[in-house]
Image (cartoon, rainbow, N blue to C red):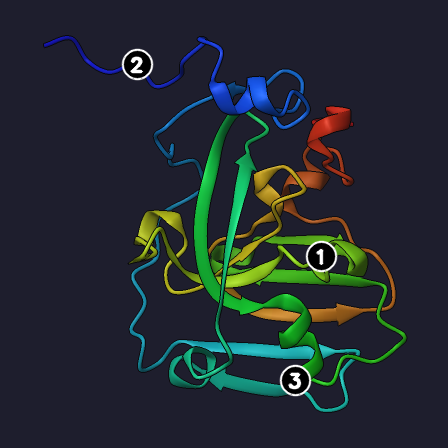
């Protein structure tokens, strides 16, 4: 049996039904390619912590159990990688970022949210992007725990931006009054990362 191609260039009926759903320059895949810089961490969940800092009423450190005890929500969304693949109808489960921000006491002075991840990786999004109803901090995908390659135990999901903004292996969430370029942004990627405007690189 021939191998199934990673991408398909046939016209998907979902694209025919919603012509603006697939951003320009993107190709659909039913697979979920694994792309990242550096090695994949293997966390001890008893020791993993999520720090919450910056423009909040009180900085805190959450255990894995405390994160999983937060109110959970399911979001079905499309994801778009800067390397030109898109995957439709992903169901992520986690805590909605708006609810997370409320529970953490985000201050009105917050203008940006910075995600700090394994290996020193960071990326930042405007607070309006983080508070989108489809944005969340996710621990499962399509009914299964995130695999280590896809960000276990916790990743951001910012579906209206190229997927590097949906940072894997979260270790801290920082609420900021100012922007700060992250790893890929300092290395040539566009800071806005809007797929429909093809904001891939500077």
From what the image shows, is residue 59 above or below residue 183? below
Q: Secondary structure at mark 1?
A: loop
* Left or right: 199 as drawn, with respect to 29: right
Q: Quadrant of the N terminus?
A: top left
Residue furthest right in the image: 109
At x 71% / y 59%, what residue is drawn?
130
At x 63% / y 37%, what residue is drawn?
162
Chain-order first, disc 3 or disc 1: 3
Q: Secondary structure at mark 3?
A: helix
Residue assigned mark 3:
103
Residue assigned mark 2:
5
Query: Residue 144's spot in the image, x, y percent?
Result: 29, 57
At x 77% / y 26%, what residue is drawn?
197
Chain-order first, disc 2 or disc 3: 2
Residue furthest bottom in the image: 58
Residue assigned mark 1:
132
Residue 37 visible to the viewer:
no
Query: Residue 36's spot in the image, x, y percent?
Result: 45, 40
From what the image shows, is residue 180 above or below residue 28? below
Q: Quadrant of residue 69?
A: bottom left
Q: Secondary structure at mark 2?
A: loop
Query: Residue 32's spot in the image, x, y percent?
Result: 37, 35
């Amino acid at each position: 049996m021939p191998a199934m191609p990673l991408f398909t260039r046939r016209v998907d009926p979902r694209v025919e039904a919603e012509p603006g759903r697939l951003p320009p320059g993107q190709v659909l895949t039913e697979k979920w390619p694994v792309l990242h810089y550096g090695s994949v961490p293997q966390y001890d969940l008893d020791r993993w912590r999520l720090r919450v800092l910056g423009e909040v009423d009180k900085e805190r450190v959450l255990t894995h159990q405390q994160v999983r005890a937060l109110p959970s929500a399911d979001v079905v969304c499309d994801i778009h990688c800067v390397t030109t693949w898109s995957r439709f109808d992903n169901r992520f489960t986690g805590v909605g970022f708006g609810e997370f921000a409320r529970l953490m006491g985000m201050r009105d002075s917050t203008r940006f949210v910075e995600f700090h991840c394994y290996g020193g990786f960071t990326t930042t999004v405007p607070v309006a992007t983080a508070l989108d109803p489809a944005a969340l901090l996710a621990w499962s995908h399509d009914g299964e725990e995130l695999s280590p390659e896809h960000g276990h135990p916790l990743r951001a999901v910012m579906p209206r931006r190229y997927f590097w903004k949906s940072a894997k292996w979260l270790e801290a969430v920082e609420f900021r009054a100012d922007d700060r370029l992250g790893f890929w942004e300092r290395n040539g990627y566009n800071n806005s990362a809007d797929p429909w405007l093809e904001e891939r690189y500077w």
